[in-house]
Image: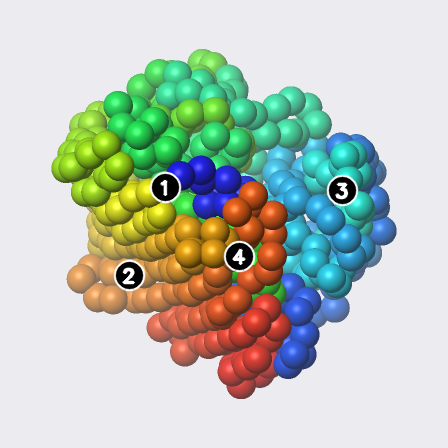
Amino acid sequence: MPRTARLARNILPLLLLAAVLVPFASASGPYVIGSANTVSADPNVIRPTTTPCVVQLFSDAQFFDFNVESFTYAPPSSCPGPWAKVVLEADINLNAGIQYDRTANFWLGPVNIYFGTTAEPSNIGPSWHIENDLTDYSSIFYTAQSGQADIGNTLCCGLTSTIYASASLEFYPLAPGQTAPLTADVVLPLSGGASGGTVALNATSSTLGGTFTFPKNVQNAYLDVYAQSQSNDEFWYTCVPNDVASELESCGNTAFRETEVSIDGQRAGVAPVFPWIFTGGIDPFLWLPIPGVQTLNFTPYRVNLTPFAGLLSNGQPHRVALSVYNADSYFSATASLLLYLDPGSTQVTGAVTQNTLTGPAPVAKEKLNVQPISITGTVNVTSNRSFAISGYVNTSHGTVTTAVSQSISFTNFQVFNITGTEYVQDISQGTLLNSYTVVSQPGAVSVVNYKTFSFPLTVNIDEVVLSSGDINVTTTAKQTYQVTDNITQGGKVTYTSFLENAGQHVDTIEYDSSFNFLGNTGQSSSQQYNAFDSTGAGYDCAISAVANVLTAFSPGCTQ
């Protein structure tokens, strides 16, 4: 059966930086019952009480011919910094018409400050609002420089919708007596060049890297990683082993993908790939008006490279690189190195004392009953491994040892039922990463950060040929981004947080026997965003839609 319809297209502050910093504020909204406009339950960034200086980056920029919008940035003279918070705001919209979802990213110099995708237009021109907390990246905003916005869009070949975007930066001064937040002293990009840009990773052997001579007093280092699936890899979670890809009418290389990080060719960390689904993915009606989790604004995964701080500080050039295991043309990647320096020292020393990280070794199991007119059975791929990386750095305030221990488990279990009149692919996928980070130094209590990341995904696609010859494709999708965080000092819990962003979507597309679109029925969707921490802050917003219009939102969305 053809599948054209199925795939349409000090120690604690530094640990807190690597922890989940939950934004607690009202949701982006506005919420209008009966509206088909794009809307999500995601919260806005919480703001300080001070009055910000606003720097407009670009206004009403038009994207229609794969053009790039260039802009010039200058630091706000009335808010010289350091800042209590730096916030990116952007508003994006399309005119009603025909257009695909598009990848969007903004750059200041070569550093990425926003990465996401756009909503597909329908009978209305959708509009939406995004915000990013860029406070950790404050050091890049002290220098006047050029930037660019890249939203790859075209009006070629029957496509009619132009994308419009505006963006600004808000700089919030410190309140009287307020201590400046701890931010990265240096931000180094892994991108396409001096003007930024993502890099396509087409295969496992493809890499995105940068060679740097680092400051000689690096105390902590992190890498914020984005790996976005594109082209053949867009639906990587539906893929199967190469030997059965043809008969199952699926993509190959199995459904296992994982981002690997290296320093000078030595394995240094792992970033699990979140299964972002774009608004044109599988069935575009699934995501109207509520997009998938993080579809419009990706969250990077932060890799702790602090055990390598002594090595990076030795005055020699070092290459930091990333790749995507099993990439199959392709993943769009970028990353940013965040370095925190020892202000009391011009030269620190140290070394990596343990590194047990090895490459992944996924295991695929096939249990298929292949008959002349049918295929039934299962395909399962799993990957499980644990590792430990430790290192120390001799700083102006003593020797600090950082030990990172992680376990990562991945499973993708698919059930197939293929006959002459039906094609069923039922996918259950789970990614779980448990991370323990212990920071210790003589004379001080140890600080332990225990963090979990869980990315469950289920997708059921059922394509049926009716007795009339018409074809119905029913898709049910559920995805969740969940993070828990727990910090203890000397055995006493000092901070906890929890974040869960979950979406559920169902729709049936109807085609005639020639795959001409007839309509859609049974659409419903919902999203719940829940977050809280031990300071007492919390956020809870739930929204739902039926027949592609908003039908309900909870009180927490507008409080």
Viewer-nearest of discs 1 and 4: 4
- Left or right: where 436 falls relative to 41: left
Q: Quadrant of the N terminus?
A: top left
Q: Earlier in the sequence, mark 1 or mark 2?
A: 1
Viewer-nearest of discs 4 and 3: 4
Q: What is the secondary structure assignment of the residue under circle 3?
A: loop
Compare residues 302 and 15 and report the one nearer the observer.
302
| Numbered mark located on residue 237 in the image | 1
User: Crowding near pointer 1: few (<14 within 10 Å), some, many (20+)?
Assistant: many
Viewer-nearest of discs 2 and 3: 3
Compare residues 126 and 74 and report the one nearer the observer.
126
Q: Quadrant of the C terminus?
A: bottom right
- Residue 390 lies, with reference to residue 519, above or below; the image says above
Viewer-nearest of discs 1 and 3: 3
Q: Earlier in the sequence, mark 2 or mark 4?
A: 2
Compare residues 470 and 198 and report the one nearer the observer.
470
Residue hosting label 3: 159
Residue hosting label 4: 510
Query: Whole-percent x and y of residue 11?
Result: 35, 50
Q: Quadrant of residue 388?
A: top left
Query: Whole-percent x and y of residue 471?
Result: 47, 52
Residue hosting label 2: 486
Query: Whole-percent x and y of residue 346?
Result: 48, 28
